[in-house]
Image: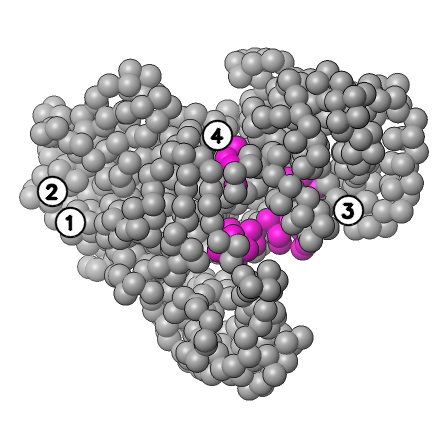
Amino acid sequence: MKKTFVIAMFCMLGACQNGVEKQVQQLVGQMTLEEKIQMLHGHTMFTSGGVERLGVAPLKYADGPFGVREELEPHSWAPLRLTTDSATFFPTGSALAATWSEEMAWLYGKGLAEETRTRGKDMVLGPAVNIQRIPTGGRTYEYLSEDPLLSARLTVGYINGVQENGAAACIKHYALNNQENNRGAVDVRISQRAMREIYLPPFRAAVEEAGVWGVMAAYNKVFGSWCAENTLLLTDILRNEWGFKGLVVSDWGGTHSTVASALAGLDVEMPGDRYFGQALLDSVRSGAVPEEVIDRKVENILRVRMTVPPIEETSDVRPVSTPEHSEMAYEIATRSIVLLKNAEALLPLDLNKYKKIAVIGDNAVKKHAQGGIGAGVKARYEITPLEGLQQKIGDKAQIIYARGYKGFSRWDRQRTGVLGDVVLTGTGGMLSGGERRGMRPDDTLLLQALDAAREADLVLFFAGNNREVETEGADRTSIDLLSMQDELIQEIARVNPAIVTVVVTGAPVDLTTLEAFSPAMLVSWFNGSEGGNALADVLLGNVVPSGKLPFTFPMRLQDSPAYALNNYPNFEQADYSEDIYVGYRWYDAQEIQPMYAFGHGLSYTSFEYVSMQTGKNRYKPSDEVSVIVRLKNTGTMAAEEVVQLYVNRPESEVEFPPKELKAFRRVRVAPGKTARVTLTFPVNALQHWDEALQDWALEPGTIELWVGTSSDDIRLKKSVAVGF
């Protein structure tokens, strides 16, 4: 295992690049055409072919991206039901994004890589980085952010963590897979500028900065062509512009042609061989696909294979999901929790004051490692919020649990009928919470919840979604809370208004009612194996909350751009008419007040943004802008803060949003102390995509540097000139 790691490290650092290329060419030269074709498709659900005669092992993929999936039958999605294929459940994508920490992303990747290699796999199918365009997206919980810079920085950290620890990463889903409804056929139409500035930066950073070894083509179409046969995406941009040297694999079942896919740049069809098996062999023999094209595909695969040597089945391996990995999951989870409000200073919980605590809600006991459609983790364990509170509080206070509501379940989905206010429509279609049909909370559960609340000094109300609600393959039709949660909290507030609400979700939900009846409120995400322990420590003040929202929580779904412009939902052609105005860019430009803004997150301490200065006042195109911020902790607890730097362009003749994130930094400051925080970004990060030139362009002029604690809480400003 150690030897494999060292070899992979040398290759990834470029020390044996020339040797690898020479060996790749030699191997290709020794292969028959049939052997080459055998490498270009799936042989099992998560294995693509090798050439045994030449000692080229098959590539083994680890389904992710938040934990190594359990082992499946060779040719189906049915699990093998082993006792040795459990793994660590790492916080899902939006939770990682809420850390605003490239270091945490690296740690995340390291843990995944180690478990991937322990299980004998070569490539992690992650990270998933598509921009969160719509609040209702089924895979929002898997993705990172509505902002391209935040997504890109976390992407680079994740990939470096994976690839510096012996495995290959496969970034997905390339590109513009921003909805789940009809994802296999919907055709995205978008301006080149919006595509380049908003949706492609995480993929570009993955290639140019992190040297990612794998790219997964998305299911959807872009400009009329499926992503797996899209020459613009796979050849013109990915390989010719960005210089990608690894392999392009289809999403599972996402290949639709032989010749078009082969010529456009797809390397591996997964999981079968319908198009890249005998059909591809016949296409080469007929001259429809030159053998040189096949050679390039094999070379791409061999670069990965030579960089990540296979693990021999006889190798000694460590147990999967070690205490070290649990600690990683815990560290990430604690930094992801977002304190939305704390109006009456209910938090952190004072157990001398609150001796009897009512814990109400299905999400207090719900586990999220698996659920819905798509990848999950057979977690070795998962600490629920109730378990975490019980373990951390012990006999210091009494906890009374009441379920309160029935969370949406797999059985309800299979029934495709009505559960309370849940309606399922369509085939594999949209999940609706907006049609209430005159329902009210379950009487028995309501009475139990009210009895618990009435008896308690304080209520911890667990609201939100679960992974049956947020699922691959189906977007929600609303952001309403299901199972009558809004009605339930109103009833609870009548008997006990001291309510701390914990929102368990991977995506934005309607917080209007919860906010009105919750003096304190947090978001704790689908937060992994250690999620319950992390949450309990934050609630009790053992850890000071420091997470920041990676996307906007709107007041109403209709305020979000795609819904406001009525260009979603769509099933045939998705017109991105909001253009570059995604997420907070839209709310700022339209002067719409969200419920909670991008970047928002409070603390148990307070910070003063004392001053800012720049290295100079004029910057050339080749320069790097450097901003130094003095940040003082004016409270009584040591804590971490995420300092955010936005750019405003008051004199621009080119259309820009009112502000755009350009840098951020997480920093820990002791009480009473002042930290010197340096934020940097290259001047070329201010470029825009010029549609007329079909190239990047920098507009010289004055820009304003805005520093703050969220996108709607700017504390310091300074003007500089750039591009001269």
Mark earlier in primary sequence (3, 4): 3
* Secondary structure at numbered mark 4: loop
* Secondary structure at numbered mark 3: helix
Amino acid carrying label 4: it is Gly
Q: Residue at x 33, y 64 (%)?
A: 588
| Pointers 1 and 3 in contact (C-beta within 8 Å) | no
Q: Position of residue 73 (x, y in %)?
A: 59, 13
Report the front residue among 261 and 475.
261
Report the front residue among 237 and 26.
237
* Secondary structure at numbered mark 2: helix
Q: Which residue is mark 3?
A: 12
Question: Which image quarter is the C terminus in?
Answer: bottom right
Distance CA(mark 4)–CA(mark 2): 41 Å
Distance CA(mark 1)–CA(mark 2): 7 Å
Q: Which residue is mark 1?
A: 517
Q: Nearer the viewer, mark 1 or mark 4?
A: 4
Magenta-span inclusion, residue 221: yes
Q: Position of residue 119 (x, y in %)?
A: 66, 26
Residue count near mark 3 (Cα–Cα under 10 Å), binned few <14, some 14–19, many ≥20: many
Q: Which residue is mark 4?
A: 184
Q: Quadrant of residue 507?
A: top left
Question: Which image quarter is the N terminus in?
Answer: top right
Q: Which residue is mark 2?
A: 490
Q: Which residues are magenta?
A: 194-222
Q: Nearer the viewer, mark 4 or mark 2?
A: 4
Q: Residue at x 56, y 14 (%)?
A: 76
